[in-house]
Amino acid sequence: LEITNSILSTGEVPGLFAKDEMMAMMSDIRLDFLRDRPGKEETPDNLKQYFTDCVRDNLHIVLCMSPLNPKFPVRARKFPGLVSGPTVDWFLAWPEEALVSVSKGFIKDFPLDCPQETKESLMTHMGMVHKMVMEVCDEYFSSMRRQVYQTPKSYLSFIAAYKKMYATKLAALKEKEGRVKLGLDKLIQGAQDVEAMKVVLAKEQVKLEEATVNTNRMLRVLEGSSAEAKQEGEQVAGIKAKCEEDAKRISAERAGCESDLAKAQPFVDEANNAINSIKPAHIGEIKKLANPSDIIKLVFDCVLILFQLPLSKVQQCKINMAKTEIAWIEPSFKQALQMMSNPNFLGQLVEFGNSGKDCMNDETIEFLSAYVDIEQFNPAVAKNASSAAEGLCTYVRAMKFYHEASKIVKPKMEALNIAMAQMEAANKALTAAEERLTGCEKKLAGLQALFTAQMNKKRSIEEGATALEKKMSQASALINGLAGERKRWTEDAANFSDQKKRLVGDCAIGCAFVSYCGPFNQQFRNYLIYDKFTVDCQSRNVSVTENLDVISFLIDIGTIGDWNIQGLPTDFLSTQNGILVTKSTRFPLLIDPQGQALSWIKNKEAERLPSWNGQSLVELSDPKLKDKLEFCMSDGKSMVITGVEDEIDPMLDPVMEKQIIRKGKRMFINVSDKLMDYDDNFMMYFITRLPNPKFSPELQAKTTLIDFTVTQKGLEEQLLGKVIGKEQKALEEQLNQVLEEVNANTKSLMQLDASLLERLTSNSGDLLEDEELIQVLANTKLKAAEVNAKLVAADETKKNIAEKREQFRPAATRGSVLYFSIVEMSLVNVMYQTSLQQFLELFMSAMDKAEKASLSSKRVANIIDTMTYMTYRYINRGLYEADKLTFILLVTLKILVAAKMLRATDVTLFLRGGAALDINSVRRKPFQWMSNDVWLNIVELSQQSSFYSNLIGDMVANEAMWKRWYEDNEPEQMIIPDYEQKIIDQAEVGPFLRVLLVRCLRVDRSILASKEFLRNTKQMGHLYVEPVTDTIEMVYKAMSPEVPVIFLLSRGDDPTDSIETLCRKKKLPAPAVISLGEGQEPVALKAINAGVVNGTWVLLQNCELGLGLMNEMEALIFRLKPNMDPNFRLFITALPHPEFPLGLLQMCIKVTNEPPAGLKAGLLRSYTPGIMVDQDKIERVDTIQWRQLLFALCFLHSVVQERRKFGPLGWCIPYEYNNGDLQSCMLFLEKHLYNGPISWSTFQYMVAAVQYGGKITDSLDVRLFRTYTEEWLTEKTCEEEYTYNPSMPIFKMANDFQYRVPSFTEHSEYRKFIDTFPEIDSPEIFGLHPNADLTFRVKEATALFKTLGETQPKGGGGGEGVSREDIVYDKCSELLSRLPEDYIEDDYKAKIRKFGGMTVPMNIFLFQEIQRLQNVLAKVRFAMVQLQLAIKGEVVMTAELQETLDSIFDAKVPYYWENTLTGDEFSWRLPTLGLWFSSLINRDEQYRSWLNSGRPNSFWLTGFFNPNGCLTAMKQEVTRKHRAEKWALDDVVYHTEVTNHERVDQVKAPPAEGIFIHGLFLEGAAWSRHEGNLVESQPKTLFVPLPVLYVTGNTKKEEERSRKELFGTVGPYECPVYKYANRTDRYFIFCANLKCTSEKYPNKWALRGVALLCNT
């Protein structure tokens, strides 16, 4: 903005271009410059100016700003060029014609199923909808103080939504209409078809009988042929069975043989392998051997034996094998060589292995065994000789073993061959038999075919008839079963035309609801739908459903059931909010102070929410917001953004406005110059916890604002569920189960109904031909009937459950009332925030702790009592003392209103009384002893309360009794005349009726009467009135590591010591104490992180100075929670601050620690061991005087502290006297007594001027404290009979109690004595008049009613009424008409010159006063004119004008009319606008009278800006008159005398010197005209007008002499005169000397706090 402002103002931005860039540009434009500006010199400055001018001529800037944005006026002031530079074009709200024109542009060509006139009316209605909503926004603001904006964007969204919804609904309606029509046609056709079937069925029966006769004849022929075939078949079957038996036996034998054969196979394989291993070369080697080894020879002998070749002659010899000599026969190697010489020798071996092996006989094997049995005849030995020998050795051995194995198999194989031959012969016989059988069967088959054909013909006829009969039966059942549907569909068909007509208006209302109703509460939504939208439709003849239910129109019951299961409350408002969230085209922005919406959204979107380290929500302040947004958008996830306050990061604007860029099939959104993928499934929710956020119009246009604030009825239903869940778990589970079943069954019924119609209509052929369809329809109908029966049963169950649930409703109602009372307390103080979650924990805990009972009613009563008291204690400990009674009164009144014992108007009457009435417009007051305010209260009471309707008549008839009651000091304790018995008879509301009367007649006793009301109300009791104190130990027990404690600070309150003491008691390390402020946040964070790990305590002080850290604290605690040490505790202290984070306040335990109120409580605190006085302190000095003065100091300390409550009457400035002051005084006294006898003057000086006086800044407060010490710290204090009671009390003390000074030796005796003090302190103990109590109590009661008033709703909307802006506009017009005309300086200067000019001091004073009054007149006139323009929208409504508007509406004086920008006094300060303006008129009259008629006889001192200046001018004039006596101004003092002129009109002439002044009021005393001195005030008369006062100047010496003559030895009371009741040096004018008596000497009046005031 600074850059833009610079361009608009000067055309350039300083430092925008570097020097080299500028030089380059100058060279570029040089030729243009020479051409355009030939007369100019070519200097850098001229070239630069030329460049700037070119830019200014060609650069176009368009600024768009909303004047409603609070930043706009701030920016306009900071950057004036933004307003002065451009051409301002106001885009104001669209007028009616524009709205209608836009709707026509969109709707004119849109097809609507309605006449053209209706379409025209609809387009006009749409424009009016926007206009009506705009008007209702103003009404909503007026009544609820909630700002809602509707922009053209909402209107365009409304029109787009209408087109979409109407098209969808119409298509669905037409489809349903078509289906219903087709369905009806099918049902009618089906009924006709059934009648036709009956005729066909009769004909089929005749055909069936003929076919039956023919079939029977053919059956007899078939039976004969069948017998022959059967006989032949039996013979064949016998042969076949024998063959099969033999085959089975032979097969078993073959298997045995094959098994045995398989055992011999390994030997064959071994032999084959051995032969395959021998190569011809191996044989050749052996041939070459001249004398081969013996093993080779023996091997070849065995081969010769196998081949049955001749061997050598048998001769004995020795052979050597494996180094062993064996006796053997001569080998036949020669023969072997011959054998080997055969080229096919190896082939012969293979051939032998394949076939010759089976020809071996036992003899061959016997010869062979002799060789094989030799131990050394084995392949291993043979291998050593030759490879061929090894193979042949293996071969020979294998042949021997094979023969032995095959000897077993051979016989079996032979037997098997014989059996196989027999089997073959049998099979041939079987084949011949089967051929004969086939011939028989062929003949039989021919006969059978003829019979079957006949049978089929008969069956066909029979089945046709049966099917037809069955079909007819089914069709009849179906048609009859669908009779209900037929009737309903017939009715629907008749209504479709009307529905289509009404759809035009219904869609308009439904879309208007979705587009506009989100920000409004339930009351205003109904007002918009029924009183605005519907009425407007009807007035324009646009058909619309009467009392349209938008919920059922926009959503089905099944979806609502799903939402309820997901956690959406069941009340209407929440259901509507659910529709708004799901149906809106814009992203929803939810106002959710109780977290209900967040809970529902989290459950609803559970599957679509992303998770970042277990966290599914995103804070608006999250530094990774952009990355998380990108992830959610690209994946089509849902994103829930919390922590929204009044603004949303502009980075999200393109997303909120759905500025989608399409590239091919992909979609993107440009966020912060980065193209991010966009998925259509992406959803974004914004959630704020602020109860009444101030969102800008732009933000409300970009989102759908929905108010999710929980309603009292909605919360009651939720709490009822929790009570039942706890008390009757089975009942709640049964209800939940029933609700789920009902939901499922309802959905099922809707689906079945749709399915029934769809199946009926989707069949293209004859309905009765489709058996499957008929079956489906029948099943569907059956299921629908079953579901209906279940729904009826569920309804019955719900009723039974509801009856049982209702027994527990009172507990839920009380819980709801309590919660909303707590919420309303946040309007009293921003720090009183309690979350719904905290309350629910309290609610559940109360049920656990409540006493059990068998009777439901008794149990409910126990829960209510426990819950109410626990809630009271929980909230009470976090309230300041001033607000504790407010809270419990608020709760009680809400309970009585909820129970319908009181009306809301009764509460309003109690809070406001007759404040709204004007004394001039009501009946004349008949009693002089009654004030005007009280009379107005009585009039209002008699008009508003039926019980007191005859109150005025009763008071007139019994005036004496009523006067006595009215003037009594404690009227609330007295019997009420005429009404006492009536009140007693009203058991339920009697206590309220009593307090109502006391409030109206004696406001000052309202607090005490309210406590009695609470004590006597059945729903509450004495527990809620008795003071309770929460110790630090009790607070600690309620703490947990993740729940911090916030100490709400007040004056003189610091919990640090008590926290450190508790820490020591728990034997833990000292807590880390950090006082927040500049640069302390990192230190605090470090301490918290260390405490979380180590389990230590952390105390953060003055946290209102570290809001940055406080804003992060909630997230920090949540982040650290998983790793917290169980001993960790976090304590926070803070003063109330409007920007203190809501979330942190809602999660913390809040505690206040104010000092106790009352003398008794203060003294008990002082005499509490460890605080001030304990047994050790009492025994420090062993004298009675020490103990007496110790008590006297504690008593004085409590008195000076308690005196603060009386406001300026007590102390001019409410000093923070603390225990340190008292401690110092005790220490001084102790040392002083050690040094010898006491010096009273020293003691008094040290207490009054040093220890306490060190902090006293006001001289009159110094005088007051000195007076206390002079009266109470003297020798008399130590006398046995001494008492603090006044010698002549105006009212007697409670129970005639004597405030004496004890001298006990035991500490406990002091506490017992203090316990006997009265509960309510008489002001006379403080030295004040009893009227001071009236002042205090009126102030206290007024504050109470004002605070209670802040918690009340601001009135209902939805009706015709004048807005606050209109009221203020009219008020400004009225005030402007009454405002005096401006003073013209030349005129009044000329008039002053006639009185002597500016040389006369009083003339200078008058000149200055008129100048100041003129400034006030000018400012007030300008402010009101500007305010009227701002209300009309012609100027910006600045913060100053808004404050002025609010103040005028509240009848208060606008801040800037009374104060300058720096806070100094600009005009004069008065409580109401009426008084202030009257004072303005009166001041103007005084000045104009002075100017026109000369100096007045008596001056109205109140009417001067600078009354001190008036007196100073007077003093100057007196001094000048005594110039001859050489008076010096510095030596002149004021001399005052009270005259006998009671009224100003009695003053006929001014004094010779000095002046008369009037308009002063005496507070704290009265003036006796007869005695001419101060006297006690009359009861209940707080201010008394002082007669005209004569003020002049006198020298100090003369004044001393004059005082002795006028006032004697007693001396006068130097009475301070103040401009306002607020007694500070700033408003001090001077001191007037007032006469006293010796009994009532000046010190007494000083303690009374007597002063003169210009304004009361």
Image: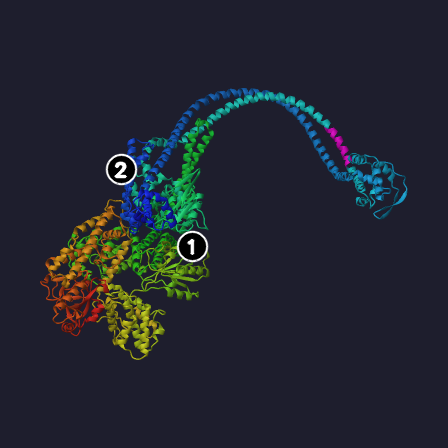
Task: Name the foreground residue: 724 vs 1540.
Answer: 1540
Q: Secondary structure at mark 1?
A: helix
Residue 438 numbered tag:
none
Residue 410 within the segment the image draws in magenta: yes
Q: Quick one: quadrant of the C terminus?
A: bottom left
Instruction: Identify the disc placed on residue 1118.
Output: 1
The quadrant holding residue 587 is: top left
Residue sitting nearer the eye, 1556 or 1142: 1556
Which residue position is annotated with label 2?
97
- Give, as a three-letter code, the residue at label 2: Glu
State the image quarter where residue 1641 is shown: bottom left
Horizontal side of 841 relative to 261 (left or right) equals left
Q: Residue furthest bottom?
A: 1236
Q: Main secondary structure of the magenta part?
A: helix
SS at mark 2? helix
Residue 662 image offset from top left, x and y in percent? 42, 39
Residue 1398 in the image: above or below residue 648: below
Q: Is residue 1327 above or below residue 990?
A: below
Identify which residue is drawn at 42% across, 28% down.
476
Q: Nearer the viewer, mark 1 or mark 2?
A: 2
- The magenta region covers 409-423
The disc, 1 or 2, on the residue closer to the chain's N-terminal end is 2
